[in-house]
Structure formats: C-alpha cells, structure tokens
Amino acid sequence: MIQPFGFSEAALRRYSRQMILREVGGAGQARLAAARVAVVGAGGLGSPAALYLAAAGVGVLGVIDADRVELSNLQRQILHGTKSLDVLKVASAQARLEDLNPDVKVVAHAVRLEAANAREVLAGYDVVVEGSDSLATKLAVNDACVLLGRPLVAAGIAGWEGQLLVVEPGRSACYRCVYRREPPEGSVPTCAGAGILGPVAGVLGALQALEALRLCLGLGAAAGGRLLLFDGAAAELRSVEVRRAPACPACGVSSSKEPTES
Amino acid sequence: MPVLVRIPTPLRRHTGGAGEVYAKGKDVGELVEDLERQFAGFRDRLCDESGDFRRFINVYVNQEDIRFLQGRETQLRDGDEVSIVPAIAGGR
C-alpha cells in the first residue's frame, strides 16, 4: 500500500524516529528524499557525516575523495574497515553506505577537489559538507559554493579541537571572509601532525550532518552567523560571531566571478 | 585591566600548556605585548614581521572579530574575554 508522500511501509518504519519530529514529518522526509548532498573527504569528518546523512535518507549522497584506505585511518575513519585497506575510499564508502541504507543513491567521485574542478563536481548537489584535510581545498570548495549559490557546512579538526562554519552564500560570511587565504606550509596543524582522538572527528562530523539535514529540511542552519569551536579537552562547545567581509575576494561586493587563487 | 585570553591548542606550548591565561592591556595591541612579556616567542606565532596578525589567525573580543571592531586598537576592559582562533584544517 502506498502511503502519503509515496513512502513504502519499510521506509516509514526506517525513518519513523525522525518523522515523529514536528520539524520533519512526511513533508520533511520527502524533502530529504529529494535532496542531493555532497561530502568532500571520506575521512575523519566525512565518515560520520556521510553515515548520518545516509541513515537519514537523503536522496543522493556524493562522496568525493581521491585516496585509498590506510591502516592509520581506521582509528577514526569509521566508514572504512580492515577489509577495505588499500581500496579507494569512495568505493569503501559506497559499499558501507549502501548497506546502511539502500534507499540512498551513493555517487562515488574518486577525485581531489581544487579550484579547477570544484564547480563542475559540486554543481550537481544542493548542499555541500566539507571535511577535507587542507585549507586550500576548503577555500576552493568555498569559492565554488559561493559561485554556485550552494550552502556549505565546513569543518576542521586537529588535536582535541574542531571548528565548524555554515556558509549560506549571499547571506552569511563565507569561509574566505573568516580565513582569507592559505597560510604558509606547515603552519596550520593537521591530524597527522597534531594527532587526534576519533570522537573529536565524530562530534564535528555529526554536527556537520545535523546542519546539512537542517538545511535540506528548510529549517536553516542553527549555527548561522557563527564559527563553532569545540574543545574536546574541556568538553566545551562555544562560538564566535562571523561577519561578511565587504572586500572578501570570494563573496564581497567587488569580487570577480572567477575562482580565487588560494 | 586583566583580561581572560583563550589560547588555542597549537599555541599552548608557549603558555606551559594553559588554555586560559590572564593578560593586561588597554587595547589588543598592548595585550599582545603583555602576552609576549609573559610568554617569550608568543607574539611571533600570532603576528608577522610587520606586526599584523597572521591571515589564518583571528582574534575575537567577547566573541566579536576585531577586524570588524578597531583591530589592534580595539579597547579592552576588565572581564573582557579575548579568543585567539587559528584556522583548523584537518579533516581526514
């Protein structure tokens, strides 16, 4: 029997715990089923983000990562497992996500995003979740999202800390309003350099999925206008205000329409 | 005018591991000098040769970015909270 909004009995049961929410219901679940979300980076952040997005039933989930699974990934990159060592991360992700939720169409993009290809790859998505491991990639993804008008949920982690920023192009600060360009090599910590415990990635990746789902549901970002700062050593989540920079090379009034060099 | 300064993890090696320190200054510029007095080498991590804050580090006074206030001349009062927030780019 076809239920309202065209959901099967199985789908209604699968999503029942979120459809109970006033903010979701059948209409919200239908919005999720029509949503196309891209996850940049299938690693520490992308793993929890993609898992929760798939579990919630987004229609299309694009996973973008050029790398293969390595042993040192498995301490935090919970999409992958021992059996997928040396497999392309997007292939490993696709298998896991399709098992979690066969309703979701998972699209694997085995590429590294940069200024030259970001717009083309991301054009087919409505919301972008950014969990790569370089400021250069974050800036390239940001610039593409600003040009495409796609909301972006970007996060970074290292050590015991993480940050999250939601960019709503044309309305809120973009990533480049906050961090204008790529700093000198080695000056910004990475997971390999600073170390990290898995759950720090889990917290931020889950927060990213939460914000992305809110955007797909039309609820707006809860973190809009703020840079969220998580300190896992103090169990603190706080925020600072972010504002659009008038002279921002990506989204400022006088910005050009071409991608900006990092 | 003691002000609470929140120190991000990458800079805590200069503060003996402390994530929160107190410093003094009538404005942000003086605060940085006081931090340098307390923790030698700290200023170089924050600022480049011309004394400007590095582009991947933002400074907030009571959660507001000083770039939208008076920059280094942003006035400080007792009880203000200053956060030093560098970009964090790890993800994988």
Image (cartoon, rainbow, N blue to C red):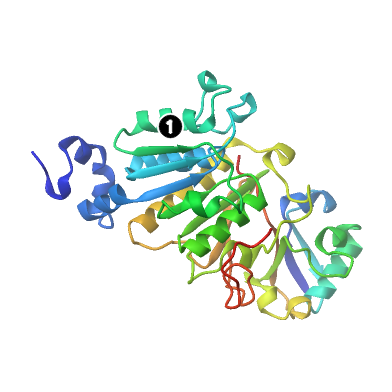
From where the camera sits, is residue B62 visible?
Answer: no
Instruction: In the rendered view, tell whether residue A236 sits above or below residue A224.
Output: above
Q: Quarter of the image holding residue B30?
A: bottom right
Q: Nearer the viewer, residue A109 or A33?
A: A109
Tell me where residue B13 appears, x and y as whole percent: 82, 48
Describe residue A61's horizontal placement relative to residue A177 as left or right: left
Q: Tag 1: residue type? A: Gln
Picture coordinates of residue A110, whole percent (x, y): 53, 36
Residue A243 higher or lower than B6, as above or below? below
Vertical placement of residue A203 versus A144, above or below? above
Asked where in the image residue A71 lies, by quadrant, the reply is top right
Relative to A236, B19 lies left or right: right
Residue A255 x/y as whole percent: 60, 73
Quadrant position of the C terminus of chain B in the picture: top right
On-image quarter of the N terminus of chain B? bottom right
Question: Mark 1 highlights which residue?
Answer: A94
Q: How many labels does the image show?
A: 1
- Say left or right for A223 vs A200: left
- Write down the quadrant of residue B50 in the picture: bottom right
10 Å crowding of disc 1: few (<14), some (14-19), many (20+): many
Residue that lies at the very extreme toward the top in this rendered image? A83
Chain designation of label 1 = A
Q: Where is residue B54 shown, x and y percent of the image?
A: 78, 63
Dot 1 falls on a residue whose secondary structure is: helix
Residue plotted at (63% across, 71% down): A248
Q: Which of B85 and B3 is in front in this view?
A: B85
Image point (56%, 42%), residue name: A201
State the residue lying farthest toward the left. Answer: A1
Residue A121 at least partly seen: yes
Q: Residue at x 32, y 45 (%)?
A: A59
Q: In this orientation, which residue lies closer to the viewer: B75 or A12? A: A12
